[in-house]
Image (tube, rainbow, N blue to C red):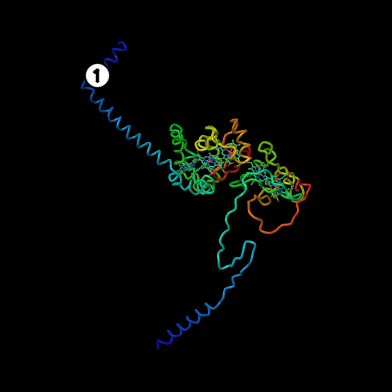
Amino acid sequence: MKILPILMITLGLVTAYTTLAEQTVNTGGLETIRGASTIDQTRKADRLKRVIKDKNPIKRNYVHQPPVIPHQIRGYRVDTNSNKCLTCHGWKYAAETGATKISLTHYESRDGKTLSEVSPRRYFCSQCHVTQADAPDLVDNTFKPIESLGND
Amino acid sequence: MTKESKIKNLWEYLRSPSSAALWFILAIGFTGGIIFWGGFNTALEITNTEEFCIGCHEMKDNVYEEYKETIHYSNRSGVRATCPDCHVPKKWTHKIVRKIAASKEVWGMLTGLIDTRDKFVDHRRVLAEREWKRMKENDSLECRNCHNFEYMDFSEQGNRSVKMHSSALASGEKTCIDCHKGIAHQLPDMKGIENW
């Protein structure tokens, strides 16, 4: 009898197909500040923001805030071979380039020892200092900057 | 024999039938010269393209890949600077000198001087220093072929650019390559280099 196996296979395929089709996918449906996104879909990328090109220093909001970068840093490499930021912000060159000197905290190691070179934990500048873009705030912020830093 | 009679003698000789061989040689030399000259210039043209430069994997896998991320490969105006724009002088005489110097690159390829990424990275400081020296000596001629200081509009440039361009550059104290190292490729270890 050859008809039996064929019958079995067709039946099996049909049931498999219907059960698969019935299964609903849990899409996540997470609502984030970037909008809703589901895992079975690729969200359209936001438009790239423009980095502010070259501005005077931007006021700080609190003491010990790492100041934000008021200029673009495209192509500035910071790696084992070179650190572009320090060619302007290092103490040797700051006067000539008009850049703010890195503060002495950048020479301190984790346990408070002062080193003769920029401390390894402060070597990768963009870990703490970031550029600014002309983008709207994603969340409301009621933080009031302190007055003594020249903010009104 | 006086000078005049010498010239007269030569003239007589050139008019005589026995000078035919000399004329023949001159003619061959002349046409040959033209053909050679043309071929030479064509060869120069071909070797002056980016495709030629990145025909060698030494150039393609290292410097070209890095350069693709930089402003001279893609920017808002879509104007590109290719390898020869920055590395081969426009002026004919300078070009010939650079081409002859570049023959050592073929030797470098044959001997596998920089045929792996590691070897290239190890050797990069030497190569970069040669380029810096060359550009320093010609006052960054290649940069200036495109970027003319005379036509830089300071009101369009950023604060930082204006500060440096109107001082050290305008006075001639420094040239482009003094401040713009690493504009198209990654840098070697910069220890001990002025301003780094």
Q: Which quadrant of the rendered structure holds the C terminus of chain B? A: top right
Q: Position of residue B160 (x, y in %)?
A: 63, 40
Residue extending furthest front? A152
Q: Position of residue A126 (x, y in %)?
A: 65, 50
In-front residue for pair B150/B67: B150
In percent of the image, x 67 and y 36: which residue is there?
A: A96
Instruction: Name the residue beneath numbered marker 1.
Output: B13
In percent of the image, x 60 and y 35: which residue is there?
A: B165
In percent of the image, x 71 and y 57: which residue is there?
A: A141
In-front residue for pair B25/A128: A128
In-front residue for pair A70/B70: A70
Q: On the picture, is B26 further left or further right than B129? A: left
Indicate the amino acid at tag 1.
Tyr
| Chain identity of mark 1 | B
Q: Can residue A124 be spotted in the picture? A: no
Q: Quadrant of residue B2?
A: top left
In the image, residue B105 sits, relative to residue B18, either above or below, namely: below
In the image, residue A137 sits, relative to residue B179, either above or below, namely: below
In the image, residue A50 sits, relative to residue A4, either above or below, namely: above
Q: Residues within 10 Å of mark 1 (few under 14, many from 20)?
A: few
Q: On the picture, is A66 further left or further right than B123? A: right
